[in-house]
Image (cartoon, rainbow, N blue to C red):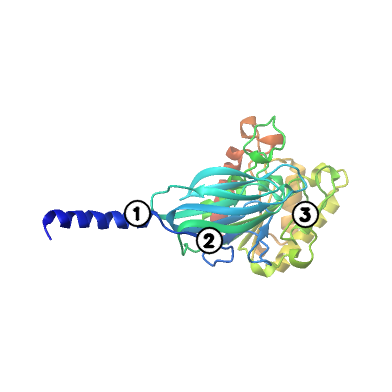
């Protein structure tokens, strides 16, 4: 074989390998695949149609290839607006996707350089925008084992502040679901800074005993018993508290209670104390941090939370108090005066510093 023929054969072989490498077979990976990594309260009673509602739910995969699609089905919620999802590729935000009352196949990435990539999808919005089913991935490439989740776990229990209500809006804005981004709420900021697992059990307008303006709907202690917040806590929707044992539970509640005329000093304190007792019953080893939140900085509210912490046994019993930095300037306000992403970053980082200083994850 002469040199010219050898060169042609060599080039042809290289081209064959390149073409094969970039033309991987598109494969379907169903939700029960063990290489798919989940975070958050998700009902897996149907392993091929896991369903969820709370903000901050995360679905993450590592793959070797160039293209990936994800399938979801959205359902109408009590609020007529749509859910939204965040798409991250290799740790970088890529897109915000609207998911209404429909079946949707999302092109998460296309034409990536051939190699290993990580896709993460998070739920930006909260339960009132409707439930979401995850139906699997289509990947032009191969699904790989992903790095395990961090060992330490934090659960954030709260209301609109914990959800991220209006955090990408301005003070003059109302509620628009596209401007709610749980990924940038204080709890998610805190968890990423501490490199812990993250879970949010939160619902805008809800309280410890009464909701905002005395409105109807389950209070947070009732919501805490569910996978899907707007359904009854029965059957498959009754949450199994043994499935996730947090090292720390952060409570950020009370702002809505104090916007209902039925709330008194006594019934608020009693309801909060009972909720702490319930949480301790489910998770006896968890440290519990009670926050005032940035929207109510009155002395009365601060004194109430400090009293509740003291009555619960205080730091000697693993119950802690943190008075968060309040919003004191419009540049830190989002929709309806809620904390925007700048304020959430301040509150999340100060909480992370508090946890570190107290050695609560040691």
Is the residue marked by circle 1 packed among few (<14), some (14-19), or many (20+) residues within 10 Å?
few
SS class, disc 1 = helix
Looking at the picture, tell me which residue is in the foreground, 18 or 157: 18
On the image, numbered disc 1 is attached to which residue? Answer: 19
Q: Position of residue 24 (x, y in %)?
A: 42, 57
Residue at the far left: name it: 2
On the image, numbered disc 3 is attached to which residue? Answer: 230
Q: Position of residue 100 (x, y in %)?
A: 68, 46
Which of discs 1 and 2 lies nearer the camera? The answer is: 1
SS class, disc 2 = strand
Q: In this rendering, does residue 314 appear at all?
A: yes
Is the residue marked by circle 3 packed among few (<14), some (14-19), or many (20+) residues within 10 Å?
some
Q: In this rendering, does residue 315 appear at all?
A: no
Q: CA distance from mark 1 to mark 2?
A: 21 Å
Q: Position of residue 258 (x, y in %)?
A: 80, 44
- Identified at 71% across, 37% down, the residue is 175
What label does residue 106 carry, if any?
A: none
Q: CA distance from mark 3 to mark 2?
A: 31 Å
Query: Is residue 306 shown left or right of residue 60?
Result: right
Q: Earlier in the sequence, mark 3 or mark 1?
A: 1
**Above or below: residue 260 compared with residue 151:** above
Mark 3 and mark 2 in contact? Answer it, CB < 8 Å.
Answer: no
Q: Position of residue 87 (x, y in %)?
A: 54, 48
Which of discs 3 and 1 lies nearer the camera? The answer is: 1
Q: Earlier in the sequence, mark 3 or mark 2?
A: 2
What label does residue 28 carry, if any?
A: 2
**Above or below: residue 87 compared with residue 288:** above
Image quadrant holding the N terminus, namely bottom left
Q: Earlier in the sequence, mark 1 or mark 2?
A: 1
Which of discs 3 and 2 lies nearer the camera? The answer is: 2
């Amino acid at each position: 074989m002469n040199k010219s023929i050898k060169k042609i054969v060599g080039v042809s072989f290289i081209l064959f390998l390149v073409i094969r490498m970039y033309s991987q077979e598109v494969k379907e990976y169903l939700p029960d695949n063990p290489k798919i990594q989940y975070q958050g309260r998700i009902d897996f009673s149907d392993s091929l149609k896991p369903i969820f509602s709370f903000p901050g739910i995360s679905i993450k995969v590592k793959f070797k290839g160039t293209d990936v699609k994800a399938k979801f089905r959205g359902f109408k919620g009590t609020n007529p607006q749509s859910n939204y999802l965040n798409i991250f590729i290799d740790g970088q935000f890529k897109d915000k996707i609207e998911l209404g009352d429909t079946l949707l196949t999302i092109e998460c990435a296309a034409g990536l350089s051939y190699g290993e990539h990580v896709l993460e999808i998070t739920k930006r919005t909260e339960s009132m925008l409707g439930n979401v089913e995850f139906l699997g991935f289509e990947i032009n490439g191969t699904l790989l084992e992903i790095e395990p989740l961090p060992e330490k776990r934090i659960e954030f229990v709260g209301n609109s502040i914990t959800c991220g209500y209006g955090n990408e809006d301005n003070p003059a804005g109302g509620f628009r679901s596209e401007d709610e981004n749980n990924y940038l709420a204080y709890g998610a900021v805190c968890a990423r800074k501490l490199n812990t697992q993250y879970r949010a059990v939160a619902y805008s307008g809800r309280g410890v005993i009464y909701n905002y303006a005395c409105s109807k709907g389950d209070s947070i202690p009732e919501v805490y018993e569910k996978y899907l917040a707007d359904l009854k806590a029965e059957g498959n929707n009754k949450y199994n508290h043994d499935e996730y044992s947090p090292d720390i539970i952060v409570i950020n509640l009370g702002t809505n209670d104090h916007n209902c005329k039925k709330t008194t000093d006594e019934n608020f304190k009693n309801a909060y104390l009972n909720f702490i007792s319930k949480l301790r019953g489910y998770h006896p080893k968890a440290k519990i941090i009670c926050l005032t939140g940035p929207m109510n900085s009155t002395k009365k509210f601060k004194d109430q939370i400090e009293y509740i912490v003291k009555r619960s046994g205080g730091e000697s019993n693993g119950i802690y108090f943190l008075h968060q930095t309040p919003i004191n300037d419009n540049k830190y306000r989002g929709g309806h005066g809620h904390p925007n992403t700048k304020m959430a970053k301040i509150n999340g980082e100060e909480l992370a510093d508090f946890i570190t200083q107290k050695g609560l994850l040691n």
